[in-house]
Amino acid sequence: MLNMRHLPFLLLILSMVIGCKPSVPSRFIQPDAMEDLLYDLHLFQSLAQNDYDNEMSQRRHLYYQATFAKHGVTAEEFDSSMVWYYTNAEELHTIYQHVAERLEQQSIMLGNNNVSYAMRYQSSNGDTTDIWTQSQFITLLPIAPYNRFDFTIKADSTFRRGDSFVMALNSNFVYQQGTKDAAVCVAVDYEGDSTRYFSTMVQMSGLSKLRIPGDHHLSIRQLRGYIYLDRGSDDTRSLKLLFINDIHLARMHRTSADSLLDARADSIAALPKDSVKMMRPYENRR
């Protein structure tokens, strides 16, 4: 029978067992130090992207060396530490999330709080609006499940037939080496179990857009999609990190002019083939 006097001691042991997780061996860069180092690497990477293409590789190498020197580590120590962290991906992802939060805070402090950018996707009459409600800052690394961000946006009463969309996001690859290869994919589910798929590749830092045309015949049930970072064919144990921020999904209603054009196209499509042929311009007229 359990002695109640021993209960506090047993609870302490239990909490230590549940909360225990592998610690980073002392020969590797510790989490707090790795977080600071990765944060600075991101800042230096941003500087390198302002250089011309033929200078970027050399400048990036110099920026890496300067960051290592600042933090008192060698490239070899960094590489061996990354190997350990990649085999303990949860620890690495936690560090990346902290870096992302710091970068987001820095952006807000500098006044880049997305307000002015988001206004591009708003109109006073509501014909254009930003419907993105998910996180504004995403961190991906090429290890499942941290290499993919999924989202779903349900249609509401403000959606109309013929609505079109533009998804825009800003990407920043922080790569030590390797091919940059990410993708944005969106599926539009319509009533009647009809679905259309749209995608675009993201292979360099900067602004990316995915345009999704409307269909005035069908009502939208939902939009679902994902942002995916591919591991590539090279060694994934080197530094590979993708920061994504400033995400927007603009929904645009059809205008009256669009409705007239759609009606005209529908009426032409319904005519006999000979009638459509007669309506074409005289292409061979001289």
Image (cartoon, rainbow, N blue to C red):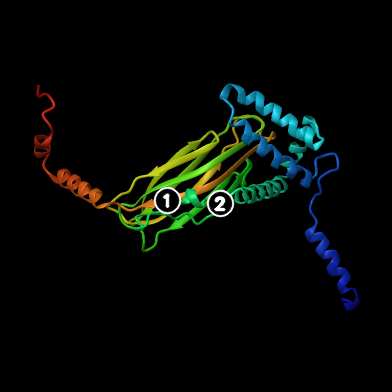
As drawn, 3 above or below 16: below
Percent across and percent down for residue 27 are 85, 39
Q: Is residue 193 left or right of residue 108?
A: left
Report the mark closest to the observer, 2 or 1.
2
- Residue placed at 61% from the left, 23% from the top? 55
Residue 213 at x, y = what percent? 34, 45
207 with respect to 266 (left or right)? right
Of mark 2 and mark 1, the one earlier in the sequence is 2
Residue sitting at 80 percent across and 56 percent down?
A: 20
Taking depth in this image into account, of 263 and 66 the one nearest to the observer is: 66
Q: Residue tagged by mark 2?
A: 113
- For the residues labelled 2 and 1, the Cα–Cα distance comes to 15 Å
**Residues packed near mark 2 inside 10 Å, few (<14), some (14 to 19) or many (20 plus):** some
The residue drawn where x is 86% and y is 69% is 10
Q: In this view, does 218 lie above or below 238?
A: below
- Amino acid identity at mark 1: Tyr
Of residues 190 and 286, the one drawn nearer to the viewer in this rendering: 286
Under mark 2, the amino acid is Asn
Mark 1 lies on residue: 121
- Give the class, few, some or many, for how many residues have Cα within 10 Å of label 1's Cα (few <14, many ≥20): some
| 64 to the left or right of 195 | right
Rendered-image quadrant of the C terminus: top left
Q: Where is residue 172 in the image (x, y as percent from the top left)?
A: 58, 39
Q: Is residue 80 in sight in this rendering? A: no
Mark 2: secondary structure: loop
**46 or 179: which is nearer to us?**
46
Q: Where is residue 155 in the image (x, y as percent from the top left)?
A: 40, 59
